[in-house]
Image: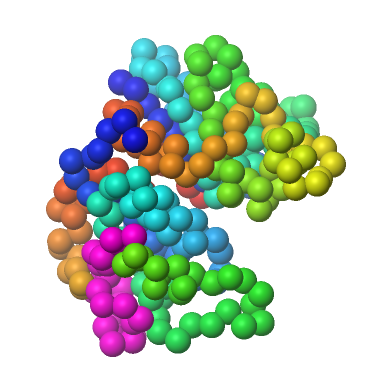
Amino acid sequence: MSDRSPMPMLVVLRHAPHGSSWLREGLDVALVGAAFGQSVTLLFIGDGVEALVKGQQTGPLGQKGTHPTLDMLAMYDIETLLVDAESLAQRGLIETDLQLPVTLVAPERLPSLFAHHAPVFNF
Amino acid sequence: MRYALLVQGAPYSHQAAHSALRFAEALIARSHRLETVFFYHDGVYNAQRLATPPQDEPQLVDAWCRLHHEHGTALLVCVAAALRRGVVDERESRRHGKQGHSLESPFELTGVGQLVEAAMTHDRLITFSP
């Protein structure tokens, strides 16, 4: 890596698991960023909050699933997991429904969050 | 300014690749440099050697190649996303015991690390997603 960003990298996850590869491929970028020595923040927003719902299994879907990857995040020092509070509430979920400890973010905090991260990757 | 583009939409399925190309042409016309285009997710299909669109439609694969030949733009394709979707170069094809290859030259297979690197080393990274 020729440069290290002075700001943490932000990976925004906007898609639910299982229906598409957006979540898996987004998480891959986060893991690679961390492996490259970047400090990485994840923001789960919209349907992306469903990625964190506890007790997921792939079973008959025949896919690998993303929940084991989420459990590996700490090993990569990715510990800032932000969840858009409004997206969570809209889906009838609360923090204890999630498989990992997260920090809830109020919608009005989002603009400054984006302003204080670079680069920002959207998935 | 030095630009990098991230293209995540398949050609002809979504607007993303068309928009990315128009943006590429516009920024070059304004004397900026387009140094890197990174293809990820379904964007890897932009590198399909065998894509054969009707002649009266935009020739997207050719348009990407032209950027490389005329402006030196690197066309980087995520290897993990590409292999899953059947976009392989000769080396990977051999390695996996397949016949034939489907990656157009001068597109090149590379790791996601190159995307992170591009985001750090260019002035702007612009994402085009479906």
- Residue farthest to the right? B99
Q: Is residue B4 above or below residue A66?
A: above
Name the residue rendered at 65%, 35% in the picture.
B47
- Residue A101 in the magenta stretch? The answer is yes
Q: Is residue B3 above or below residue B127?
A: above
Q: Is residue B54 left or right of residue A71?
A: right
Residue A101 appears in the picture as rendered: yes
Closer to the camera, A52 or A75?
A: A75
Q: Is residue A79 left or right of residue A109?
A: right
Where on the picture, by quarter, is residue A99?
A: bottom left
Name the residue rendered at 48%, 82% in the picture.
A56
Closer to the camera, A101 or A2?
A: A2
Q: Is residue B18 above or below residue A62?
A: above
Q: Percent x, y for residue A9?
A: 27, 49
Name the residue rendered at 44%, 37% in the picture.
B114
Q: Percent x, y for residue B94?
A: 77, 40
Q: Percent x, y for residue B1?
A: 30, 21
Residue B39 appears in the picture as rendered: no
Name the residue rendered at 36%, 50% in the picture.
A35
Where on the picture, by quarter, is residue A108?
A: bottom left
Magenta highlight range: A76-102
Q: Percent x, y for residue B127?
A: 41, 41
